[in-house]
Amino acid sequence: MRNKSFYSLKYLLLAYLMVTVVYPLVSLLSTIRGKDVASVVGSTQFFPMLKNSFVTTILATIISVALAFALAYALNRSNIRFKSVFVVLFTVPMLIPSISHGMGLVLLFGDNGLVTNLLGLNIGLYGYKGIVMGSVLYSFPVAFLMFHDSLQYEDYTIYEAASVLGLSKWNQFTTITLPSMQRTVVSAVLAVFTMVFTDYGVPLMTGGTAMTLPVYMYREVIGMMNFSGGAVVGLVLLTPAVVAFLMDLRKSNSADASSTVTKPYYIEPNKRRDMLVYVCFGVVLFLLCLPIIAFICLSFVKKYPIDMTFSLEPIKKLLENKIGIYFVNSMAVALLTALLGTALSYFSAYVTARSGKSPSNKVMHFVSMLSLAVPGVVLGLSFLLSFKNLPIYGTIFILVMVNMVHFFSSPYLLAYNSLSKFNSNLEDVAETLGISRMRLLFSVYLPCTMSTVVEMYSYFFVNAMITISAVSFLINFRTMPLSMMIPQLESQSFIEGTALVSLMILIINVVEKLLAFAVKHKLEQREQTNLSALIAPEE
């Protein structure tokens, strides 16, 4: 009886996850008929679109993962200063929607772009080149964070032994570093591939005549109201994502436990190497900042590209277009998604990490991870087909629901990993003392993992602000968020407005990240003392 509330909440949450994650996917699959498949697959444009999607995705994945690994390796193998600042700067592209990256490239290198007009050089942006460039900008920060995290935990003892045996730096890299990074490389490749393959923001802006499957799906559902055709394309987009998810899950389960780091990696002094790293980082950051510079420049001009004089006319026009309502919508969706998503994902992780491996817990763990395999554009369509006749459809709440599902897995894993570190005997001790699981949660686990909670909240908030794929099929003029104004304003040729909206989203997310960083810094100092007594000691 003491844990009745815990089990009631557990099964209520499990039912909620089944309704919001599993049921929409089943609904999507149930709408597909043989004639719909034949109609879409048999069309003359299907295989060219499929080819465009795969070619651009493969190229972008190779470049993105290689760039991310090079930056992370240079950061962790040099003695440069302000490393944490560079980590933050390299992840700034994650704070704006993918469609903004495409728009930024158009503003810079399009037929009337700033660089094109300034240098008189047209690089032929539209097509494969533009899609790949925008996709790399959009996806490489994710791979960079994965590599950066892995490289921080390498044990220098192995490298010392290799040096004694006479192995050169190159041989150490190929025989020690690369094999140790194998699992991270696979995870990064699968994550980037899925992101790029299912994104329609960048191809919508820079694709030109090279249409990809997500763009086709978006136009079929939004423009033609062809739900059955969209569902077929959704199934095609879902397949690689599910395969990538299963491969990554299998790799994670079969991987050996990482060895304990007995000695941090020692970096030899080398001023020439460090100077070269500074130069390379400066070039990369300049290129990353170009779209943001374009947004700043074009947000305050009278009429791009005809009249480039300073003007506040874009702000006036956006106010006339009721941008205040869309701003309130975005903030409401982001705040509610962050609050509710953090609470649900944390409790789900508490259940699966701290209450055994029962069948129901295994199901909850799998469903909590499943959203990693569902592209946002597929999830949005599945929600449309599942809930279009319910009162919540057409309201802010369905946007909050779809965002919580879309971004559930990563915060869940953050909490799961943090909660798994605690001493495994805590529950037994609490049971002996008559302490309920809910009291243990609020009195012990939450106070000791508040920095993780802040990180989870920040993740939900930022992604809810920038997403377009998950909500594009579920919005109307009353519930439209800021991110969805970008394609709308672009279709009206209000380029200054798209730049200003992108800049607004970036500023909001930067402020949120700064606040989260300040809160985490204070919390981590407090948690360090609490954790030392509760984390299981190493054997």
Image (cartoon, grey):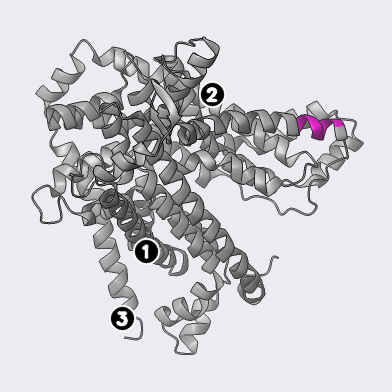
The quadrant where residue 37 appears: top left
**Overall secondary structure of the magenta section:** helix
Mark 3 and mark 2 in contact? Answer it, CB < 8 Å: no
- Using the numbered discs, state the Cα–Cα distance from disc 1 to disc 3 in whole angstroms: 24 Å
Q: Quadrant of residue 397?
A: bottom left
Vertical side of 491 occupied by 448: above or below: below
Instruction: Give the mark, 1 or 3, whose residue is nearer the N terminus.
Output: 3
Q: Nearer the viewer, residue 362 or 297?
A: 297
Of residues 318 and 472, the one nearer the viewer is: 318
517 left or right of 311? right
**Disc 3: which residue:** 4
Percent of width and height locating residue 167: 86, 30
Callout 1, which amino acid? Leu
- Where in the figure is residue 329, as x and y percent of width and height? 28, 53
Which mark is in front, 3 or 2?
2
Label 3 crowd (10 A; few <14 / some 14-19 / many >=20): few
Q: Amino acid at mark 2?
A: Ile
Q: Which residue is mark 1?
A: 339
- The residues colored magenta run 272-277
Q: Label 2 belongs to which residue? A: 62
